Image (cartoon, grey):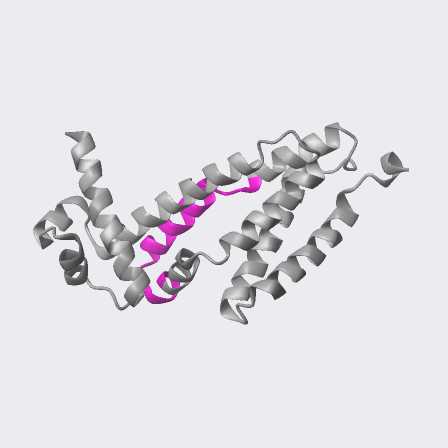
């Protein structure tokens, strides 16, 4: 019974995503989702209280999938520097996901603070800082990075690249430029992380 309910939720959510991608968040109504999913309006409201809740469910799934993909990407036994470079490449390629644009639209469109707080909580619980902190900690232990606060360093590192992606979405959307900017930003970060004495 639980599996059937989850399958129906996913069916509704997948139909909603196709509507969001075609018409944007604001341009999609529950009636649009009814038509795309083949589920009655009552059936949709049985599983989700609102369009906002459907969207948050989709964001949660997307964040979980991305976190798993990042963990897989960083599983290789490589130096910390190589793993950070993989994270940067992963972040740049993920920037092209239309879901990020939808999240930006959602934040601009929704006026209910409680809904925005739920989105913020979702994103904080699935934050990548802990993954990057572990990478930096390993780099410190191996002597690759200088001794510093891995938690603070990871927050700076992740925030910088997420900020670059956000700026890219609002400004130029030139992926080749984003790659170049990210490469330069990575070089600047490494200057603050690398243990030059160990390299010498």
Residue at image point 56% right, 37% down: 130
Residue at image point 13% right, 45% down: 46
Q: Main secondary structure of the magenta part?
A: helix
Measured as percent of width and height from the top left, residue 181 is found at 66, 61
Looking at the image, is 40 positioned above or below residue 69? below
Quadrant of image for the N terminus: top left
22, 5: nearer the viewer = 22
Q: Is residue 14 magenta?
A: no
58, 123: nearer the viewer = 58
170, 69: nearer the viewer = 69
The residue at the far bottom in this view is 172
Looking at the image, is 127 positioned above or below residue 23? above
Measured as percent of width and height from the top left, residue 129 is found at 56, 41
Q: Is residue 113 magenta?
A: yes
The residue at the far right in this view is 200
86, 31: nearer the viewer = 86
Q: Which residues are magenta?
A: 106-129
Residue at image point 20% right, 49% down: 12
Quadrant of image for the C terminus: top right
Residue at image point 69% right, 36% down: 80
| Quadrant of the image occupied by residue 183 | bottom right
Confirm whether residue 75 shows in the render: yes
Measured as percent of width and height from the top left, residue 18 is found at 28, 57
């Amino acid at each position: 019974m639980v599996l059937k309910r989850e399958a129906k939720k996913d069916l509704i959510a997948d139909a909603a995503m196709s509507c969001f991608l075609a018409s944007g968040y604001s341009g999609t109504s529950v009636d649009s989702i009814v038509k795309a999913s083949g589920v009655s309006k009552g059936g949709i409201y049985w599983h989700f209280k609102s369009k906002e809740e459907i969207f948050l469910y989709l964001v949660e799934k997307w964040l979980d999938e991305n976190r798993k993909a990042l963990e897989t990407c960083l599983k290789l036994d490589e130096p910390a520097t190589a793993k950070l470079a993989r994270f940067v490449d992963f972040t740049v390629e993920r920037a092209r996901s239309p879901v990020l644009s939808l999240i930006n639209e959602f934040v601009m469109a929704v006026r209910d603070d409680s809904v925005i707080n739920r989105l913020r909580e979702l994103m904080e619980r699935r934050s990548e800082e802990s993954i990057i902190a572990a990478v930096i900690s390993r780099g410190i232990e191996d002597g690759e990075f200088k001794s510093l606060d891995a938690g603070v360093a990871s927050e700076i590192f992740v925030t910088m690249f997420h900020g670059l992606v956000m700026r890219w979405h609002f400004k130029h959307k030139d992926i080749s430029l984003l790659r170049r900017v990210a490469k330069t930003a990575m070089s600047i970060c490494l200057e603050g992380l690398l243990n030059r004495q160990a390299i010498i």
